[in-house]
Amino acid sequence: MNRRTLVALLPVLLFGALALLFYRGLSGDPSTLPSALINKPVPPFTLPAVEELGVPGLADAELKAGTVTVVNIWASWCVPCREEHPVLVELSKRTDIRLVGINNKDDPANARRFLGALGQPFAAVGSDRDGRVTIDWGGYGVPETFVVDGKGIIRHKHVGPLTLDEIKGTFAAQIEAAKIDAAQTPAP
């Protein structure tokens, strides 16, 4: 192969390599995105309550109180959050867990209207107006849901809206595993 042919083929080869890289990176199930925080303590944070919602804000210390907690990151402007919301209302009926929310980059009035119209399933909702806490949790977007054991260790991350099948199947299994993990793991 002469040099002229090699120079002509170089852009084609680079394009093919990039196309393969993008295909591998973008294909697959987005709910299985890895998290560097799995089996690590929740990041330190304190979030104020969403104004006039009637439930307290949220802080990392509350996630170390002995109960498995499901932390849902959501926003009123998020269409998949609206689709997921009835599932969260159903999940909130469980008495063996605590369901809390982090309201991400949202106006408090919009968050109140959203929960007023669709139901308020959360025991606490922290207002993450600038999205910094969501980033600290390793958030890619909304909705994202985490299972945190009773010692404040993140045990599972679910990206995208939860479904009824998941909260009765695979997600329920993650909650049960978090209960076992908390019983077997020393406190951080």
Image (cartoon, rainbow, N blue to C red):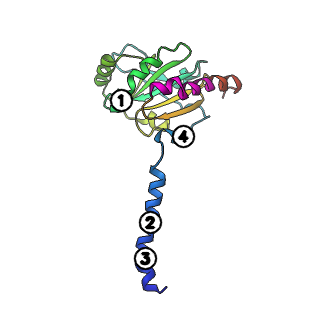
Label 2 belongs to which residue? Answer: 16
Is mark 1 in CB contact (under 8 Å) with mark 4? no
* Closer to viewer: mark 1 or mark 2: 2
Residues in magenta, as a range: 163-178
Q: CA distance from mark 1 to mark 4?
A: 21 Å
For marks 1 and 4, the one nearer the N-term is 4
Residue 161 within the segment the image draws in magenta: no
Label 3 belongs to which residue? Answer: 9
On the rendered image, what quadrant is the C terminus found in?
top right
Instruction: Inspect the image, locate mark 1, and give the three-letter code of the amino acid beneath it.
Output: Ala
Identify the secondary structure beneath mark 1.
loop
At a point 52% along the width and 34% down the height, the residue shown is 157
Q: Nearer the viewer, residue 159 or 135?
A: 159
For marks 1 and 2, the one nearer the N-term is 2
> Does the rendering let one see residue 48?
no
Is mark 3 in CB contact (under 8 Å) with mark 2? no
Residue 174 within the segment the image draws in magenta: yes
What x and y, as percent, mark residue 175?
57, 24
Question: On the rendered structure, is 14 left or right of 64?
Answer: left
* Closer to viewer: mark 2 or mark 4: 2
Mostly what secondary structure, the magenta segment?
A: helix
What x and y, as percent, mark residue 51?
34, 19
Circle 1 residues within 10 Å: few <14, some 14–19, many ≥20: many
For marks 3 and 1, the one nearer the N-term is 3
Q: CA distance from mark 3 to mark 1?
A: 48 Å
Numbered circle sitting on residue 35: 4
Q: CA distance from mark 3 to mark 2?
A: 11 Å
Q: CA distance from mark 3 to mark 4?
A: 38 Å
Instruction: Inspect the image, locate mark 3, and give the three-letter code of the amino acid beneath it.
Output: Leu
Is mark 2 in CB contact (under 8 Å) with mark 4? no
